[in-house]
Image: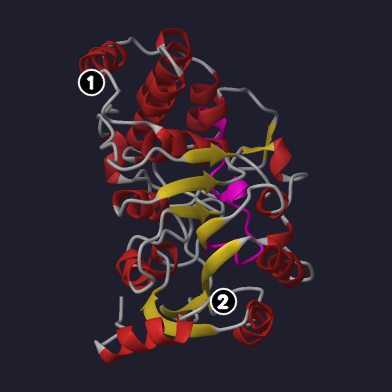
Amino acid sequence: MIKYLGSKRKLIPHIMRVVAQLGPIDTALDAFAGTTRVSQALRAAGMRVHANDLATYSEAFARCYVQADPATIDQARLAKTLAHLQALPGVDGYVTETFCRQARFFQPANGMRIDAIRAEIDRVAANESEHAILLTSLIEAADRVDSTTGVQMAYLKQWAPRAANALELRMPQLVAGPAGGVSRRDANELATELGPVDLAYLDPPYNQHSYRGNYHVWETIARGDEPEAYGIAMKRADCRTEKSDYNSKVRAAAALEQLVQSLDARWILISFNDEGHVPAPELRRMLDSRGEWAELQIEHDRYVGARIGIHSPHGEKVGRVGRLRNIEHLFLAGDGAQAAMDALVSRGEPARV
C-alpha cells in the first residue's frame, strides 16, 4: 500500500482484537476508508464491508481490495495487460509537466510513463474491477518512486534515492472474502441512507490538513484529469474550495456527533488521536448517546514526517518537532463494549505500537 498519513497499519492488530471480542459480525462500514487497510482486514476476517471515502483514489483501492472477487478475476489476462502497460513508451503529458517540471514529485522518465499508462488503462480495462486493479497498481508503483516524506504538500529539496528507480507495475494482492460495497460519499450523508450494519468503523480526519491536499497527486492520477494547479506543490485548484467539516476545528465535533447519532449500527468503533480537533472528553460525551461504551488508549509513533522533521515547500528543514509519540484512542460503543475491552486489557492490551 502507499505511504499514507493516518494509516492504521500498526493499529490494525488492536482493532481486529477488539472486533474479535464481539462475536460473529456479518456486515461492516468503513466510513473513512483511505487506503482501505482496515476494510481489507475486516473483509479477510469474513465480513461484507462497505468502504466509503470522498477521495477518488480511495474508491479505486476499495474497488480493487474490497469489491473485486479474486475468484472471478481473469488473472492471466491481468498479467498480460500489466505487461503491456509496463512496456509502453513514455508520453510527455500533464503529469510530466505538472509533477516533474513545475513540481518535483517524480523524475521526468517516470512521469512520462505514468502519463502513458494512465491513458492506456482507460482504453484497455475490460470492466470496472479490472480498471480499479490496474489503477491501483499504477498508484502504488508511483508511490514507490516519488520524492516526498509521505505527503504531497511538498517534495524533497534533494531527490529521494527511490525516485531514481524505474516505475514498476506489480499485481495487487487481492483479498479473499465476501465482496463488499464501495461509495464515494460524504460519510454523514451516507449514514442516513446506508441501512443497518453490525459494525461501523470511524477514522475521520482529525486536523486542518485535508487528505485531498495531502494526496492531490494520487487524486489527479486516479481521476485522469488535468486540473488547474497552484503553488509550489501544484495542488489541484479544488483543494482550495472542497473542504470537509472534519478539517475545521469549529465544525468537526458537530459533524462527528451527527454521524455517531445517525448510524444504524450495533457497534461503533472509533479511532482518534490526541492531536485531533475533537478532545477525548468530547468524544466520550458523544458516545453516551449510544449507551454502553468503553475505551483503549494506545501509544504509538507519530507519522514519519514528524520523525524526519518539518520542511518548507522547498524541502528545507525548518522549525522543531514538539513530540514523537501520540496516544490513539479506540472507542467502542454498543452492548458488551465494556466486557470486550476488559477482556483485552486482562490479556495485556493496550500495547505500545
* Residue pictured at 52% horizontal, 30% vertical: 222
Looking at the picture, tell me which residue is in the foreground, 124 or 160. Answer: 124
Q: Is residue 282 left or right of residue 13?
A: right
Looking at the picture, tell me which residue is in the foreground, 182 or 94. Answer: 182
- Is residue 55 highlighted in magenta? no
Looking at the picture, tell me which residue is in the foreground, 9 or 164. Answer: 9
Q: Amino acid at mark 2?
A: Glu
At mark 2, the secondary structure is: loop
Mark sitting on residue 275: 2
Looking at the picture, tell me which residue is in the foreground, 90 or 261. Answer: 261
Give the magenta range: 201-221
* Residue pictured at 29% horizontal, 22% vertical: 73
228 above or below 298? above
**Can residue 106 be seen from the camera position used here?**
no
* Residue pictured at 52% horizontal, 16% vertical: 93
Which part of the image, by quadrant, shows the N terminus? Answer: top left
To which residue does mark 1 refer? Answer: 75
At mark 1, the secondary structure is: helix
Lower position in the chain sequence, tag 2 or tag 1: 1
Label 2: how many residues lie within 10 Å, few (<14), some (14-19) or many (20+)? few
Label 1: how many residues lie within 10 Å, few (<14), some (14-19) or many (20+)? few
Distance between the alpha carbons at the discs numbered 2 and 1 = 43 Å
Instruction: Check if mark 2's residue and mark 1's residue have beta carbons within 8 Å.
Output: no
